[in-house]
Amino acid sequence: MSKKNIAVLVSGGGTNLQSLIDCQKNGYFGNSEITLVVASKPGVYALERAENAGIKGTVLARRDYEDIASYSKALVETLQNADIDLVVLAGFLTIIDEQVYEAYPNRIINVHPALIPSFCGKGFYGLHVHEAALAKGVKVSGATVHFVTPECDAGPIILQKAVEVKQGDTPETLQKRIMEEAEWKILPLAVKLFCEDRITVEDNIVIIDERE
């Protein structure tokens, strides 16, 4: 099992990044490790988390590029120059194009705070997801880790975990529960499975090698 270099792409505070860093400290990913954190804007707290963990952080600000294509090209070059094997989107809110997906087919994963195909796609990010779930009156929500493809939130699903929606929940309380009970568990697990070469994709369906 070869060592994998992992890049985490962030746009904000980096709570999911922290859950990955904590798992890495405990040896959860074996000899694979996060070697790069890329932020889409300067000054985000996720960069501080990376620095505190001794992980290289870099800023690739969208505003420095005239369009999505030139930004995506720069991102691919940044990842390839760092010999990255797996790209993790952890609250990365900048649009990228097919250049990135073609350079890393079935090697980019994202965590979404709902049970796809519910409450996903364009416009469903952050608290908007939980506002929509509560407006619909669902009794369970949760999180999904999936491979990223050009179609928003439509790539092969790797893992899902359901979380109870409680009466009186606000978007903020539901967001917090889904992060703690689902996102922070299944995102590191998906990274671990990838690093252990236990994920294959056939006809858009993820098959996980169940070996212990």
Image (tube, rainbow, N blue to C red):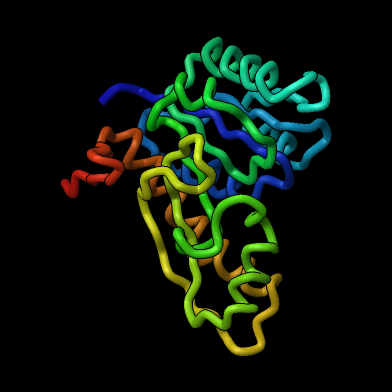
> In this orientation, which residue lies closer to the viewer: 55 or 78?
78
At x 45% / y 60%, what residue is drawn?
Answer: 117
At x 32% / y 41%, what residue is drawn?
Answer: 193
Q: Quadrant of residue 3?
A: top left
Using the image, determine if residue 174 lies above or below residue 35.
Answer: below
Left or right of 55? Residue 157 is left
Q: Position of residue 77 (x, y in %)?
A: 59, 12
At x 55% / y 18%, what residue is drawn?
Answer: 79
Left or right of 112? Residue 197 is left
Q: Quadrant of the N terminus?
A: top left
Q: How many marks?
A: 0
Q: Residue placed farthest to the left in the image? A: 211
Using the image, determine if residue 126 lies above or below residue 110.
Answer: below
At x 62% / y 73%, what residue is drawn?
Answer: 174
Determine if residue 117 is in view.
Answer: yes
Q: Quadrant of residue 41?
A: top right
Q: Position of residue 206 (x, y in %)?
A: 28, 45
Determine if residue 212 is in view.
Answer: no
> In this orientation, which residue lies closer to the viewer: 120 or 161?
120
> In this orientation, which residue lies closer to the viewer: 168 or 46?
168
Q: Residue placed farthest to the bottom in the image? A: 167
Q: Position of residue 192 (x, y in %)?
A: 36, 41
Q: Position of residue 70 (x, y in %)?
A: 69, 16
Left or right of 134? Residue 202 is left
